[in-house]
Amino acid sequence: MTVVAGLARRASRARNATTRSAPKGNGNVNGKRILLIIGGGIAAYKCLELIRRLRERGAAVRVVLTRAATEFVTPLSVGALTNERVLTSLFDLSDEQEIGHIRLSREADLLVVAPATADLLARMAGGHADDLATTVLLATDKPVLAVPAMNPHMWTHAATRRNVARLAADGIEFLGPNEGEMAEGGEVGLGRMAEPHEILAAIAERLGGASGASAALAGRRVVVTSGPTHEPIDPVRYIANRSSGKQGHAIATAAAAMGAETVMVSGPTNLTDPAGVATVHVETAREMLEAVEAALPADVVVCAAAVADWRVADAAGSKIKKSKGKPVPKLDLVQNPDILRTVAELDAKRPPLVIGFAAETDNVVANAKKKLRTKGCDWIVANDVSAGTGVMGGDRNSVHLVTAKGVEDWPRMSKDEVARRLMERISKGVAKLRGAK
């Protein structure tokens, strides 16, 4: 628990809970053909992870690198992941079929441009065809998904806004950009490229139709909590737990990808709402509990949020000023509602499967076992968040799944992989519950 000052970029966040529903229809990508056009931005490295995840799910991926993209990722590294020849020039197609760029542009089920840099967007909007990437984009009759990445000032520049509006009117779809720190100079703002799991979910959504493994939770309703809660001290300060929301958002993404009707109740984060997930934005623990209760009934509730245990009894209506000689203000704290226990102790509306998270700094498994007993939930996902683990705000996690039957120690993996593995376990657990009825 830390007391932190509210940053200026939080000032514009609405104090009331809001709901935004993304389109439904997440499906798998098995057997689909993706043409990935990688632009020349530092975010190009994320495409290596995206390719790996697409290939894991059975998609065929061909890649076109712009000339600038080769400064950030190499044809060798991309080709090793796609198991396909990587194309960088119109002349790369000279030994293939005649007018190869036409075939290339139309044999894919979806074209993805990532990172879609300011320059590449401008050339797309202008209808240029001066390299393989723009020629393919001009010749295609298939849907195109653009994933922008650039400096915040470039994204908000009038020229870029005109280009994006022109492309949107032409039928190009956009994902992102996200808000966060830029690679250059520590600038913060809108401009970060969406993460690989977000792009994967958007691709699956656009290709449509849940089937096979991705339909494992079809017809089921899953509620996920994510991120921290902010408990106001005054209008500019709050009490919070450290949380990026990455694990909770990844779980919601994985649930939707497996066909579940998914609701995510999220505290303040810098992450983009997952595609195919109805997202409810809240600030405080009490707002989060209210939103979770409103989302019931559900088959599964996963409480992954880092909910602040306490709040200030009487938050100040104006900023508390400090002055020389004035004593440090005393904060009278009261306990916040226990969302996990509240859901687990419900009667008629109790979900068949209630799962909590335990972020511990010592005695991880022992504390998780205790939490399983005291909260009344079915499973606890425990992880070590002590200094040096890099879990807080990082992209990797090492967890223990604690149930009444025992403890499963999972290897260290990405938070996306943790989410997928957890949802696979959940789908099996729900199937057993269904068979027992």
Image: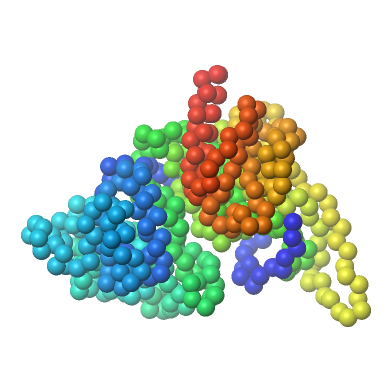
Name the residue at the bottom extreme.
Answer: 324
Query: Which quadrant of the view contains residue 39?
Result: bottom left
Report the quarter where the C terminus lies: top right
Residue 65 position within the rendered picture, expressed as x and y whole percent measured from the top left: 27, 65
Picture residue at 70% right of the left edge, 50% below the top:
361
Q: Is residue 347 above or below residue 79?
A: above
Give the position of the N terminus as an image quadrant. Answer: bottom right
Where residue 236 sits: x, y (%)? 73, 69
Res. 168 in view:
no
Would you place residue 69 above or below residue 300 in this image?
below
Q: Residue at x 60, y 29 (%)?
A: 352
Indicate the quadrant where residue 116 lies.
Answer: bottom left
- The image shows residue 312 at horizontal and vertical percentages of 81, 58
* Residue 218 visible in the current orientation: yes
Q: How does the figure colour the protein chain or chains?
A: rainbow
How many circles with numbers are drawn on the protein? 0
Q: Is residue 195 above or below residue 218?
A: below
> Is 270 situated left or right of 209 in this image?
right
Observer-nearest residue: 165 or 27?
27
Q: Position of residue 167 (x, y in %)?
A: 32, 67
Q: Residue furthest top?
A: 436
Residue 330 picture quarter? bottom right
